[in-house]
């Protein structure tokens, strides 16, 4: 069925190359000409000759027509492909064969237009100083999401590095990475089950590799290009491998203060997560907050909070604050909270 729809989509696109532009009729009587890009949530995105992109509230649209086929997803998850034509009573029709139009489709039943099945971003940032002060720092991150009808796969990670030259000797200030992968299967529009993996490394926390695996349930409160909010919870298994460097710890060897290696750890745990992002100011700024906590032998929490500003053709600026908390660090004379302030430039799609 999907291969047949894809073939129709290609044929209709080729047949419409010589046509003019799409036309959107608003409820106030205004008409906008351009190219319909997508509809997600409550907003319709259009490209016009006088503006790269404009955004219109979906409930302000009376009807629309296009000269190229649209991929439309209805509220009941039915997927349709065809050229849109105007209809009455806040609806449209689809021409999927070049010969006949469908029955009128109420605009209220249209969940998405030209749904994005593949999205993500990649960002880099850093600092380089030479002279009386020699300092280097680097940050890089990437996130990718692939969506199907009832499934979603997301994966990504980040790397941070910093050093400074003191007295002719280079001293390392930071070196850590985090990688993750999640698979979700939706049992309804809101409820889903997930399986996840998380890997972290931090030289200054003496963590060679922290790995966490688990399954659980999630609830997607909002899901669109404009607003996303979901919560997750479930059991996890956590393993922490530490670097083999001796430390002085009380009671390490029969109550003596002799150097010894920090112990590795493994335990069952509980996990929770909150994921949020939302556009404001006509998609001019996107706020985001990602929070994940794992509690077993110790409590580990990582959060990412900040904003993104789309600049031009997918290029974006990101400013964020990251907090990593691990209460077991206090047992070994290390600080429990690490904070990073990051500025980066990247590309989103």
Image (tube, grey):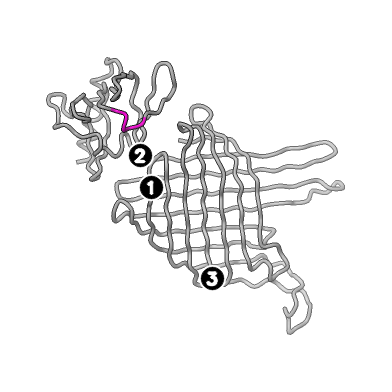
Instruction: Specify which label sits upstream in the sequence, 1 or 2.
Output: 2
Q: Residues within 10 Å of mark 2 (few under 14, many from 20)?
A: some
Could you give the CA–CA distance between mark 1 and mark 3, rounded to whole angstroms? Answer: 30 Å
Q: CA distance from mark 2 to mark 3?
A: 38 Å
Which quadrant is the N terminus positioned in? top left
| Magenta stretch holds residue 299 | no
Q: Which dot marks residue 296?
A: 3
Magenta: main secondary structure equals helix
Dot 2: element: loop
Residue under the point 56% across and 39% down: 123
Give how far apart the Cα atoms at labels 1 and 2 are. Answer: 9 Å
Measured as percent of width and height from the top left, residue 134 is found at: 80, 41
With 143 as the anchor, is 345 left or right in this view?
right
Q: Would you name the residue on which mark 2 appears?
A: 41
67 is higher (above) or lower (below) than 288: above
Could you tell me if the residues under marks 1 and 2 are in contact, i.e. CB atoms within 8 Å? yes
Asked whether, in this view, residue 294 is left or right of residue 243, the answer is left
Residue 103: which quarter of the image? top left
């Amino acid at each position: 069925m999907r291969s047949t729809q894809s073939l129709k989509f290609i044929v209709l696109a080729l047949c419409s190359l010589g046509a003019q532009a799409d036309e959107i009729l608003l409820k106030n009587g205004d008409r906008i000409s351009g190219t319909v890009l997508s509809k997600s949530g409550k907003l319709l995105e259009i490209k016009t000759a006088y503006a790269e992109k404009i955004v219109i509230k979906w409930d302000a649209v009376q009807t629309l027509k296009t000269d190229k086929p649209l991929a439309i997803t209805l509220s009941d998850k039915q997927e349709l492909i065809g050229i849109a034509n105007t209809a009455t009573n806040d609806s449209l029709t689809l021409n999927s064969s070049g010969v006949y139009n469908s029955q009128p489709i109420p605009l209220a039943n249209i969940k998405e237009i030209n749904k994005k099945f593949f999205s993500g971003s990649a960002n880099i940032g850093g600092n380089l100083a030479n002279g009386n002060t020699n300092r280097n720092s680097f940050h890089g991150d990437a996130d990718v999401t692939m969506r199907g009808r009832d499934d979603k796969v997301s994966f990504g990670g980040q790397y941070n590095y910093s050093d400074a030259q003191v007295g002719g000797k280079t001293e390392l200030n930071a070196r850590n990475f985090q990688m993750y992968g999640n698979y979700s299967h939706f049992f309804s529009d809101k409820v889903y089950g997930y399986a996840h993996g998380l890997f972290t490394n931090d030289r200054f926390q003496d963590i060679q590799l922290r790995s966490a695996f688990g399954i659980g349930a999630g609830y997607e409160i909002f899901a669109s290009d404009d607003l996303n909010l979901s919560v997750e919870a479930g059991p996890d298994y956590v393993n922490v491998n530490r670097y083999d460097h001796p430390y002085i710890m009380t009671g390490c060897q029969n109550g003596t203060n002799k150097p010894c290696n920090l112990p590795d750890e493994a335990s069952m745990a509980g996990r929770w997560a909150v994921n949020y992002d939302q556009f404001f100011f006509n998609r001019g700024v996107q706020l985001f907050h990602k929070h994940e906590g794992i509690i077993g032998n110790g409590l580990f929490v990582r959060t990412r909070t900040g904003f993104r500003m789309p600049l031009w053709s997918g290029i974006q600026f990101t400013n964020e604050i990251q907090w990593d908390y691990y209460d077991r660090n206090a047992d070994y004379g290390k600080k429990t909270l690490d904070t990073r302030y990051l500025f980066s430039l990247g590309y989103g799609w």
